[in-house]
């Protein structure tokens, strides 16, 4: 499985730009060789003509997306590859073809996204900078699909077309596609997307996969064909052969179980050190009958993988050991990581497979938040920095941990009592996990720094690197955030955070706390003249704003009933402030309605002032709403302003009322601790 060209290798455009990640991808090269005889050299099977005609008809005039279902994964891949090659040869569109399979190292979301983006021509990388995380890769792919002219000039620059084929999505290994993080939805004019799945993996209507891909019903066509020739069950033949050789067969079967459990081709050394294969099992496999050894292919670099996806699926379905094998991989990886954290330098060498895929196995085995957070650590970052593509890999693990922490936070908000100290402590802990992940992501992206660099439009995508000694530029913002958080606390908690703030302020000019948005119930703040003008219909802007010194004040001395009536007649920020200003005087039921009104207005007018007003409403906000807003606002993709994550628009200081709402003073201390810890680790 090497990148060496063969007579049936894919044409150059389907291998990606010269010098880029995709062109050197061994799995992609192996895929095209594996289907070469069917897709390039041999004639199409007679019963395949109907499918090829259906694909042509869809491409010519169907909706933007197509779900293709077939029973035999090998035949399905060969037919789709043949059709994609025909489209490319006719120059009907720029064609991108990505096979999804552990055999080719493309079953994990990170690997698929890197390869898919790497297949775009060079102007895509110039347009979207160099994506540094799975989230940024997803965003870049979506933007490319929305602006086809950026990534295609086929058949001509006036009428660019783009065809993206993602083959075998049922083999996705770590929870993607995720409807909350779609990357193939809402294609723009000229874009066509094909996703293929096993016929047994979807309902007749295709709704399951349509929902997971976040496709609208009207933009999807379902193309399927009856398969009267199910794939031969090579796994069953191999099992019967193993039964004939006694104990040797048991050992060889255990080896094949391990190959079925891994998520990418794996070397002999990694099978022993990372996957837990015993040498006797490997040697028994090497002595096994031909039908057994024929299940597995070994590439030119000595990596083992199942030769055929159908056989792999059949073998896995009949084995009861795969879960235990994955649990062993996770336990082995975490034990080694904990040992590294206490060991002195130099770091011991790690099996490459364990670094690359421990996080994915943890996701598959639903590891707890605490275990996943162990991958957001100095020791784990050090392991990744020794690997090609280490920045993207580490950030993928950090994002998995963040998603798990967010899910746990939302679950705690839905199930726990607001008055239960234990529930509050759980919310505070999970919130601080989310914040830690976001800060680490932001700091590493700031150190990578490609957002500030000029890019050659012809440069293909290569994986970004990061200089950990490069400053983030957030020293003052960190100090301001800690000083501000200390000002919100009292007693021993304030003293603790103040010590961290003093450390952060060393060498800086005077640092003062920043104002925090809030709603006041001070009736002396009411202005009778303002009340009169509001009754007469004056706008928010005409009244010089209702937000004074970042504090939402009671805007008038109107009664709650009259203020509610007037607020309902307003729009945008005026509506937000009008409802926010009367929150202290409303009944609990009316407060819930008022907060919902503020949130609805924010979704329509989500600028900085609106976010401040929304944060000021935190004391009356439902816990789930507060958590969702904070998670959505903190550390959006493509942020080039890490200091802003601390003190800017949507930063932690502006969101501190939400932090307090979710976990009280303990959450504020925890967030301050995360800021201080990440600042020492990634200054």
Image (cartoon, helix red, strand yellow):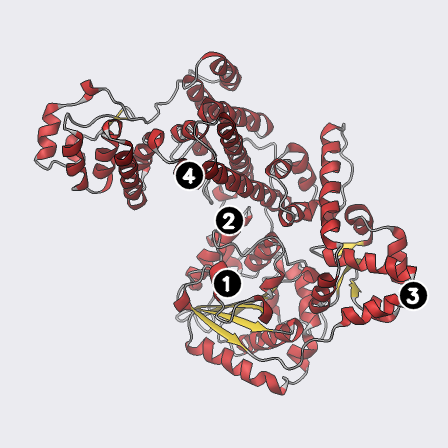
Are the residues tagged 3 and 4 within 8 Å (C-beta)? no
For disc 1, the marked residue is 208
Q: Relative to residue 385, is residue 79 depicted above or below?
A: below
| Residue 111 in which image quadrant | bottom right
| Residue 264 in which image quadrant | bottom right
Instruction: Look at 45% across and 70% down and name the residue there.
Output: 161
N-term mark: 1 or 4: 1
Helix, strand or loop at mark 2: helix
Residue 624: mark in rendering: 4
N-term mark: 2 or 4: 2
State the separation of the CA atoms marked 3 and 1.
43 Å
State the separation of the CA atoms marked 1 and 4.
27 Å
Task: Specify few, some or many for label 3: CA neighbours under 10 Å numbering under 14, 14-19, or 20 or more.
Answer: few
For disc 2, the marked residue is 136
Residue 245: mark in rendering: 3
Q: Say if residue 1 shows up in the picture.
A: no
- Residue 128 coordinates in the image, percent (x, y): 47, 52
């Amino acid at each position: 499985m090497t990148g060496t060209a063969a007579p049936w290798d894919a044409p150059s455009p389907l291998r990606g730009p010269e010098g880029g990640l995709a062109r050197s991808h061994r799995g992609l090269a192996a895929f095209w060789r594996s289907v070469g005889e069917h897709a390039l050299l041999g004639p199409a099977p007679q019963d395949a003509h109907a499918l090829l005609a259906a694909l042509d008809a869809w491409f010519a005039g169907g909706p933007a997306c197509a779900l293709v279902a077939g029973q035999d994964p090998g035949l399905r891949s060969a037919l789709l590859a043949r059709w994609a090659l025909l489209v490319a040869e006719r120059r009907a569109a720029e064609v991108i073809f990505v096979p999804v399979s552990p055999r080719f190292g493309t079953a994990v979301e990170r690997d698929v996204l890197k390869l898919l983006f790497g297949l775009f021509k060079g102007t895509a990388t110039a347009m979207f900078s160099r994506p540094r995380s799975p989230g940024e890769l997803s965003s870049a792919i979506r933007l490319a699909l929305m602006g086809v002219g950026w990534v295609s000039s086929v058949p001509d620059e006036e009428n660019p077309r783009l065809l993206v084929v993602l083959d075998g999505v049922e083999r996705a290994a770590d929870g993607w596609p995720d409807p909350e993080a779609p990357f193939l939805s809402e294609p723009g004019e000229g874009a066509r997307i094909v996703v293929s799945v096993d016929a047994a993996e979807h309902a007749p209507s295709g709704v399951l996969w349509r929902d997971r891909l976040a496709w609208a019903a009207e933009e999807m066509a379902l193309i399927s064909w009856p398969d009267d020739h199910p794939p031969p069950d090579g796994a069953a033949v191999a099992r019967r052969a193993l039964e004939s050789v006694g104990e040797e067969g048991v050992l060889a079967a255990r080896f094949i179980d391990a190959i079925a459990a891994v998520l990418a081709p794996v070397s002999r050394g990694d099978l022993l050190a990372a996957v837990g294969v015993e040498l006797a099992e490997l040697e028994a496999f090497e002595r096994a009958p031909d039908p057994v050894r024929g299940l597995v292919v070994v590439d030119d670099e000595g990596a083992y993988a199942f030769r055929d996806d159908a056989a792999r699926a059949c073998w896995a379905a009949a084995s009861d050991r795969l879960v235990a094998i994955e649990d062993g991989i996770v336990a082995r990886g975490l034990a080694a990581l904990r040992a590294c954290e206490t060991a002195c330098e130099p770091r011991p060498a790690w099996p490459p497979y364990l670094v690359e895929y421990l996080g994915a196995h943890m996701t598959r085995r639903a590891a707890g938040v605490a275990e996943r957070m162990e991958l957001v650590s100095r020791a784990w970052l050090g392991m990744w920095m020794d690997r090609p593509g280490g920045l993207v890999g580490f950030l993928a693990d950090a994002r998995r941990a963040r998603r798990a922490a967010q899910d746990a936070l939302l679950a705690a908000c839905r199930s726990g009592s607001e008055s239960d100290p234990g529930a509050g402590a759980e919310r505070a802990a999970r919130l601080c996990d989310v914040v830690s992940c976001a800060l680490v992501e932001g700091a590493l992206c700031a150190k990578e720094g490609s957002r500030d660099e000029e890019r050659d439009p012809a440069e293909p995508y290569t994986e970004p690197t990061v200089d950990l000694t490069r400053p983030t530029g957030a020293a003052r913002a960190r100090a301001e955030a800690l000083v501000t958080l200390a000002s919100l606390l009292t007693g021993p908690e304030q003293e603790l955070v103040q010590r961290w703030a003093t450390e952060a302020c060393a060498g800086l000019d005077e640092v003062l706390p920043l104002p925090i948005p809030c709603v006041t119930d001070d009736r002396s703040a009411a202005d009778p003249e303002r009340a009169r003008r509001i009754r007469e219909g004056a706008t928010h802007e005409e009244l010089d704003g209702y937000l004074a010194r970042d504090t939402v004040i009671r805007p008038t001395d109107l009664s709650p009933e009259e203020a509610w009536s007037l607020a309902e007649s307003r729009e945008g920020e005026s509506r937000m402030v009008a409802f926010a200003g009367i929150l202290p005087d409303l009944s609990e039921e009316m407060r819930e309605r008022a907060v919902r009104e503020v949130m609805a207005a924010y979704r329509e007018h989500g600028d900085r002032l609106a976010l401040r007003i929304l944060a000021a409403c935190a004391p009356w906000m439902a816990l789930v709403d507060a958590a969702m807003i904070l998670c959505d606002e903190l550390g959006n993709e493509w942020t080039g302003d890490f200091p802003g994550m601390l003190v800017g628009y949507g930063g932690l200081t502006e969101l501190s009322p939400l932090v307090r709402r979710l976990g009280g003073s303990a959450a504020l201390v925890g967030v301050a601790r995360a800021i201080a810890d990440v600042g020492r680790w990634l200054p």
